Amino acid sequence: MDLQILWFCLIAVLWSGYFLLEGFDFGVGMLLPFLPRDERERGVMLETIGPVWDGNEVWLVTAGGATFAAFPAWYGTMFSGFYIALLLVLFFLIVRVLSFEWREKGDSPRWRATWKWANAVGSAGASLIWGIGLSNLLYGVPIDSSGDFSGTFWDLFSVYTVLGGITVVLLFAFHGATFQTLRTTGDLCERAAGTARRLSVLAALVLAAFLSWTVAVAVDRNDKSVFPPILPAVLGIAAVGLAVVFTVRRQSGRAFAMTAAAAVLWVATVFTSLYPRVMVSSTGFGNSLTIDNASSAHYTLAVMSVVAAIFVPLILLYQGWTYHVFRARVGGEDLPSPGEAVSRPTPGSG
C-alpha cells in the first residue's frame, strides 16, 4: 500500500478510536446534571470513567501528531484556519479536566454544582466543535492557490457542519448512557437505561440525516461517486438503528457495541467521502489539499511507519489491559456478556 494512503487511513483510525473511547466519556459528562439524583450518584458516574478518561485523550494527541508528521501542509492549513475553533476546544477540555480535579476540593452545593456544569458544558462544547470541524474538511473551507486558509472563523458554520456537530453531541450522549448501563447498578442503572431509550430515537434520526447528507456532499462538493461513501453511511445508520432496538430490549452490551460502531462509522463516512483529498477548498476545487500535495517525503513516512508498527500495538495492549482491569461495575459486579440483558430489580430483592 502507498504510504500516503496508509497514513491517511491510520489518521482516520486514530480519530475513530478517539470518538469511540472519548465519546462515552463526553457522554457521561453531558449527563452529569440530569441523570444522577444526588452527589453520591454523581460521584459513582465519575468513578466509572475516572481510570480511563485521561488515557482516552492519547488518541487525540496521537492523531494530531500523526497529521503534523505525515501531512504537514494539511496540519498547517487546518490549524491556522481552525485556530479559534481549536482554542475553544482547548478551553472546553481544560475546563473539563479542572472539573475532575477540583470537584472534590469543596463540599458546598454551589461548588459542586459549578464543576458539575463545567464538566457538562466542556463535554458538550468539545463534542460540538469536533463535529463541526471534521465536517468542514469535506464541506469545504476557503483555501487559496498557495494552500493557505483565506476565510474567517464564521466560514466554518453552515447548516451541514452545524448538523455534524449536533449529531456528535447526541451520539456521544447516547453512547455515554449505554456505557452507564454497563458500569452502574441499581436505580442509577435503571435511570441510565431510561435515558438511553429517550435519547436513542432522536440520535438515530439525526445521525441518519447527517450520514445521508454526507454522501450527497461528497458527490456534490468533492467529486466523489456514491460508492464507496455510501457503504460506511449505510452501516452507520444500521448500527444506530440496532442500538435503538437493543436499548429498548435492555440488551445493554449489544446497545453499547452498536453506539460504539456508530461513532466509528461517523468518522469512517467522513474520511471515506474525503479521500483522496484531506481538505476541500470552497473557493476553488483545484486548491484543495490532497494526500499527494500535503504529505511528507517518502523517507519520513517510511520511518514513521516503522515506529508506528512498534509502538501502536503496545499502546493498544496497554489500553486494553486497563479496560480489562476496570471492567467491573462500580458496585462490584462483573460486566454482562455482550448479548446479556440487564435484569430489572424485583420487589423485595436484597
Image (cartoon, rainbow, N blue to C red):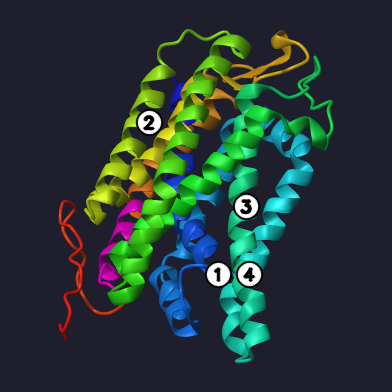
- Tell me how far mark 4 sits from mark 2, CA to CA: 31 Å
- Name which residue type carries label 3: Ala
Describe residue 291's horizontal placement relative to residue 17 as left or right: right
Q: Which residue is mark 1?
A: 33
Q: Residues within 10 Å of mark 2 (few under 14, many from 20)?
A: many
Q: Residue at x 30, y 70 (%)?
A: 326
Residue 278 rendering spot, x and y as whole percentages:
60, 24
Above or below 90: residue 210? above
In this view, 128 is above or below 43 = above
Q: Quadrant of residue 252?
A: bottom left
Q: Position of residue 244 (x, y in %)?
A: 32, 43
* Residue 206, above or below 123: above
Query: x%, y% of residue 17?
Result: 42, 45
- The residue wearing badge 2 is 237
In 3D space, how far apart are the residues under numbered discs 1 and 4 (Cα atoms)?
7 Å
- Residue 224 horizontal/vertical position (percent): 52, 10
User: For this rendering, which residue is in front, 77 or 167?
Assistant: 167
